[in-house]
Image (tube, rainbow, N blue to C red):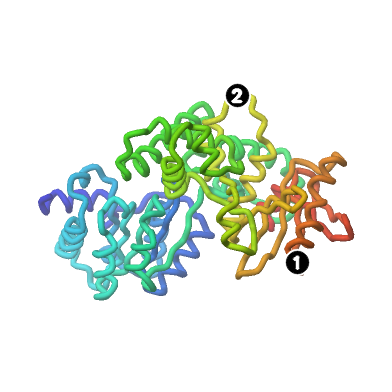
Amino acid sequence: MDKSEIITILNEWNYWNRELPQTKVRAFYDDKITTLLKYEEILVIKGIRRSGKSTLMLNSIKNLLANGVDVKNILFVNLEDPRFINNLSTKLLQDIKDIYLEYLDPDEKPYIFLDEIQNIPHWEKWVNKEYELKLSHITLSGSNSSMLSSEIASSLSGRYLQIDIYPLSFKEYLQFKSIKLNTKLDFIEKKIELNREFEAYLKYGGFPKVLDYDVADKKDLLITYKDSILLKDIVARYSLKEFKTLEEIAVFLLANSGISQSINKLKNNFHISYDMANIYLEYLIKAYMLFEVPKFDYSLKKQNANDKKYYSIDLGLSNIMRVPNLQTRGDDLESVVFLELLRRGFKVYYYKTSNGLECDFIVEKDNKIKELIQVTFSLKDEKTKKRELRVFSKAIQELQLKDVTLLVITEDNSSDIIYDDLEIKSINIKEWLYFS
């Protein structure tokens, strides 16, 4: 590419001579990115396509400007611009940097934002050079976790910090809709409005742009997201020829979020080889469409051998895959809770007791089990209440747990429960998502 073409593209994507666009604040991520930038390590922002990574980069640029950084000292590069497509290489990165330096002449070490870096083969070599020679502050985004495979993580070892980005939480969703709750009394007074928005959140998910679309068009947008993720982040990246089977597996696992599954089950269900089932599942996880949750065991060998559970990144994607009238309320609530636990930085397992009782989530942080969580639509039915609560005492006994919080997340009103001589907190899911 010649110099004039590159500077034209850069000028269109940057804001050297114009105002930055209006963007939504995502305080949790914005504050975290601002904090991590202070350490002058390579910052990696990763997550599923269309989850808002580019917007968070723009918010970061705004924060830099607000803190006195000159706009000419900031470079944003969109590596999905189609004009770059035939030139994706580390040479392109160096050409972009050289041309930026020539035209903008920054007077301090520049802040360089590289959006969708996984499009550049061996990008880590160029980034590592910039870091080691202290030439740039580097922030990267990526939509495929293979960009931080063990080999790449090794080459950047000790040089990078990372932040995982998810679609909107329910609290962020309400903020995007300009609905603010200051106290739990607001939660009561706005009950009807909250219930309506929660139903929309369960149905259409939390991809930021989906909120701006009319109801009639949300499904079409979500279908384009699904196709884009499968085609760009999996089929094109791994040069796959068998798209139909990949899509069928994606549809099955997304539509049945929270399902317990094994490679052998997938192999038999889709009449494919074990290796193909294994690699397709791995691709879906690397593209952030799915999350894998192991069954808890103190033996890592047993933990790895047991069936895993798989959760969808977004219920909007799940719902476009489902057949009409499929009843998934309980599973959807469980998926929402799972994603919120990830956002809060917890490591999550499920557990089955020796007599077959299942605990939805065993929650770990700082190498300690903190909570046991059950998720259910309601505890009003005595049979359901018994099924959901009796697992706690059995799990505590088998795992020899102490000082753990026992929590049931439901759509009932919040309350305190004593069951099997254990103190259990039952909390309304919307209240938990917003105030906890």
SS at circle 2: loop
Whether label 1 touches label 2, CB < 8 Å: no
What is the three-letter code of the residue carrying label 1? Gln
Front-most of 76 and 22?
76
Residue designated by label 1 = 400
Q: Residue furthest left?
A: 2
Image quarter where the C terminus lies is bottom right
Left or right relative to 115: residue 306:
right
- CA distance for labels 1 and 2: 44 Å
**Quadrant in the rendering for residue 331:** top right
Provide residue 313's location: percent of width, then percent of height. Answer: 52, 45
Can residue 282 be seen? yes
| Residue at 79% over, 62% down | 397
At x 39%, y 50%, the residue is: 143
What residue is at 50 percent from the left and 30 percent from the top?
219
| Comparing labels 1 and 2, the label whose residue is closer to the camera | 1
Point out residue 146 in the picture as x, y percentages from the top left corner. 38, 54
Q: Is residue 312 above or below residue 344?
A: above
Say which mark, if any, is on residue 324: 2
* Residue at horizontal 89 percent and vertical 60 percent from the top: 421
The first of marks 1 and 2 along the sequence is 2
Tell me if 99 is positioned left or right of 294 in this view.
left
In x, y percent, where is residue 323?
A: 58, 25
Check the image and name the residue furthest to the top: 324
- Secondary structure at badge 1 equals loop
Q: Give residue 243's position: percent from left, percent from top.
A: 37, 33
Foreground residue among 410 and 432: 410
Would you say 327 lies left or right of 386 here?
Answer: left
**Mark 1, other Cα within 10 Å: few <14 / some 14–19 / many ≥20:** few
Q: In front: 302, or 333?
A: 302
| Residue 175 visible in the shown view | no
